[in-house]
Structures are given as C-alpha cells and as structure tokens.
Image (cartoon, rainbow, N blue to C red):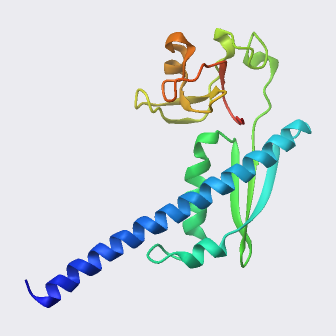
Amino acid sequence: MSFAKRMSRQSTTSRANQLDCDRQKVQKWVLETAGELERECEQASRNASFSASIKVEYMTVLNSLQQLPRDWETLSQALQRGLKAHGFSKLTIKSVTWNKLSVRAEWDETSSEDSEDGPCSGGADCHRAGRVDTCGICDEDRSLVALAPCGHVLCKECGQQLRHRQCPFCRQPVQCATRGLFMD
C-alpha cells in the first residue's frame, strides 16, 4: 500500500473519530440544556404558568467542535430534536447574543374535558392525545403520550395496551400517561 493511501485511510479514520466526538459533545450539551429547561418549566408550572424560557451559553461547545459546522444552527437543530419528545405545543430557539441561545417552551392547558378522571389520576381514561411522531413500539406515526413517572413516550394506542402497567422501555410501574409537558 502506498504512503498516500495509508495517509488517506488514517485521515478518514481520524475524521470519523472527530465526528463521533463532536456528536457526543453536542448530545451532552443538549441533555444539560434540556435538564435546565425542564427545571425552569417545573418552576413555571408551579406558578400556574404554561410557558418557560432560559438562556444558555453555546460558544464553549461550538468552539470545541472539530468536524461539525461551527454555527448556532447546528446546536439549535440538535436541541430541537432533543426536545421533540417533550411534547411542547410551541418551542422557540433563537440566538440572542453572540454566545447565548434563548429557548422558550410552551405547553397547553389541560381542561376537565380532556379526562373524565381529572388530571392524571391513573385511570384508563388518563391517556390523552399528544404530539404526533413515530412510536418506538409500533413504528407508526401517531399521537404520543408520556408515561409517568419515567417520561418515556409511545403512541396512545400502544399505551392503552400496556401489560402489567409497566413501561415497555424501562419496566418501571406506570401511574398514567399524559400529553404535553412531563417532568420528574
């Protein structure tokens, strides 16, 4: 094998490793940001609000990237994907300064018509239609619900067929399923 061919393989391998490392850095930042937003949403909901917002620093992670594009949209898109399963009715992510993103989440008010049993009482009617996405169980695009207390999401139909009222992903006991914002 020629020297140039060996260098080409080595460069390709190094690039792939750097991409993996970049993706891990972005995923870690998304998880940390999601946790911060969840805490702020929890506080807002205790104050009878249906929205919350945070400002997060993003330049540190952006400057550490070696292969992924170094623009705020790279992180914004990753954060949008990471927060999709939360079921917010509206999610706005925008750059507000040279190093900060503003993340605003809104969720719908639950009315008494949504459930005969009242809010998340654990009865069979506790399931409510949520955001439409691909269910991790049946692989169909359907309304998703979040299981309490674990927070895993699946479609309403699969949620209604739970055996032994256990989460099919983590096997925790399920108290109920609800659409929209769900927090630990």
The number of callouts visible is: 0
**Quarter-of-image position of residue 67:** bottom left
User: In the rendered image of this protein, does residue 37 appear above or below residue 151?
Assistant: below
Q: Answer above or below: position of 97 versus 104.
A: below
Quadrant the N terminus occupies = bottom left
Q: Position of residue 56 (x, y in %)?
A: 73, 64
Query: Residue, x 61% and y 63% (percent of image)?
Result: 76
| Residue furthest bottom as drawn | 3
Which percent across, then down, holds residue 111?
80, 23
The x and y percentages for residue 62 are 59, 74
Q: Is residue 102 left or right of residue 29?
A: right
**Residue pictured at 69% horizontal, 50% vertical:** 35
In the rendered image, the quadrant that contains the C terminus is top right
Position of 52 relative to 18 (above/below): above
Q: Residue at x 60, y 54 (%)?
A: 80
Instruction: Report the residue at 70% width, 34% height from top.
Output: 182
| For residue 90, side relative to residue 137 (left or right) | right
* Residue at the extreme right: 47
Residue 72, horizontal then vertical, whole percent:
61, 71
Q: Describe residue 79's horizontal placement relative to residue 134 as left or right.
A: right
- The front one of 32 and 147 is 32
Q: Residue furthest left?
A: 1
